[in-house]
Amino acid sequence: MTTQFAGAIAVVGPGAIGATVAAALHDVGRTPLLCGRTPRDRLTLQDDDRLIAVPGPVQTDAARIDRKVDLVFLAVKDTQIDAAAEWLWALSGPDTVVCVLQNGVEQSERVAAHSPPARIVPAVVWFPAQTQPDGVVRLRGDVRLSLPDTLASRVVAEALRGTWCAVELAANFGALAWRKLLQNAMAGLMVLAHRRSGMFGRPDVADLALAYGRECLAVARAEGAELGDDAPQEILEKFQALPIDMGTSILADREAGRPLEWNIRNGVISRRGRAHGIPTPISDVLVPLLAAASDGPG
């Protein structure tokens, strides 16, 4: 006989990804504490024809948090880690597990530099969710997370057990994280074109995306990721199979004039490539343009 997870849970950063996880927890009676920058009475998730309202309010002042929790889902962008540090200090004790729902392959290092000695679990997020202009989060696929197979990860899996958020404890987590990074890196092309997934139907864009994917693959393999030659082609075909209006989080940030996660999604390819002596000619053009789009000047 199994028992329900009884620990206290918080979601820091109730945007599209954080709201999806919060809704999955609330749907089975494990409503988390919501923490963020914008005060809201509730979160609303649209899953096909179903609307799920997660009760708030969203807490906006970390100084008013008076208890530690057992599990924190950190769902802020990498560009917001500094601002989220006060939440981690307020919510985390030495036994708290912090599950980092962020892009990239450097989550543990990045968060560890801004958090107390909690147990950090990096995650690969596999589901598409987008915040609509009215604030409702629209879920556009099955919800799934991949985690490394560790004791801390098992706390996360237990918290999500019985929800519609599937959790995979993966022995090959490093390879999965790099594969997702290839996908995120290739999506960076959408920012410069200011177009959505339909652009990958153009033969010239498809050729560029494949060449860039192969450049990223060479770096991933040098980092120890066991990925096959067909990974870039499979990712391209995934983009081509999406609805033509499907966006990506970095494109949404560009359209809203927000800072971009260019460094952890694309810059990492250049940085790690240089460390291994691997040429990255496409990155050498793409990364400065993404950085300028994010940070200026001009």
Image: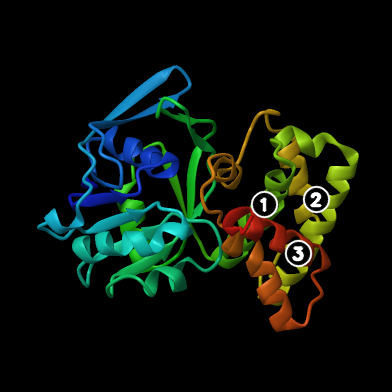
Closer to the chain start, of discs 1 and 3, is: 1
Query: What's the residue at 78%, 36% (across, down)?
Result: 199
Mark 3 closeness class: few <14, some 14–19, many ≥20 residues within 10 Å? many
User: Label 2, on which residue?
Assistant: 209
Horizontally, is 234 left or right of 208 in the view? left
Q: Which of 256 and 199 is in front in this view?
A: 256
Mark 1 closeness class: few <14, some 14–19, many ≥20 residues within 10 Å? many
* Mark 1 element type: helix
Comparing marks 2 and 3, which lies closer to the viewer?
Answer: 3
> Residue 283: which disc?
3
Q: In which quarter of the image is residue 255?
A: top right
Q: Which amino acid, by three-letter code, is at mark 3?
A: Ser
Residue 211, compared with residue 222, is above or below; it is: above
Horizontally, is 134 left or right of 3 in the view? right
Q: Nearer the viewer, residue 296 or 225?
A: 296
Number of numbered discs: 3
Q: Quadrant of residue 263?
A: bottom right
As drawn, the residue found furthest toward the front would be 298
Query: What's the residue at 47%, 28% (across, down)?
Result: 132
> Residue 183: which disc?
1
Query: What's the residue at 9%, 57% (across, down)?
Result: 66
Residue 60, compared with residue 177, is above or below; it is: above
- Return the x and y of residue 298 as percentages of the image width and height: 64, 55
- Return the x and y of residue 170 as percentages of the image width and height: 51, 60
Horizontally, is 128 left or right of 116 in the view? right
Query: What's the residue at 59%, 55% (across, down)?
Result: 294
Closer to the chain start, of discs 1 and 2, is: 1
Comparing marks 1 and 3, which lies closer to the viewer?
Answer: 3
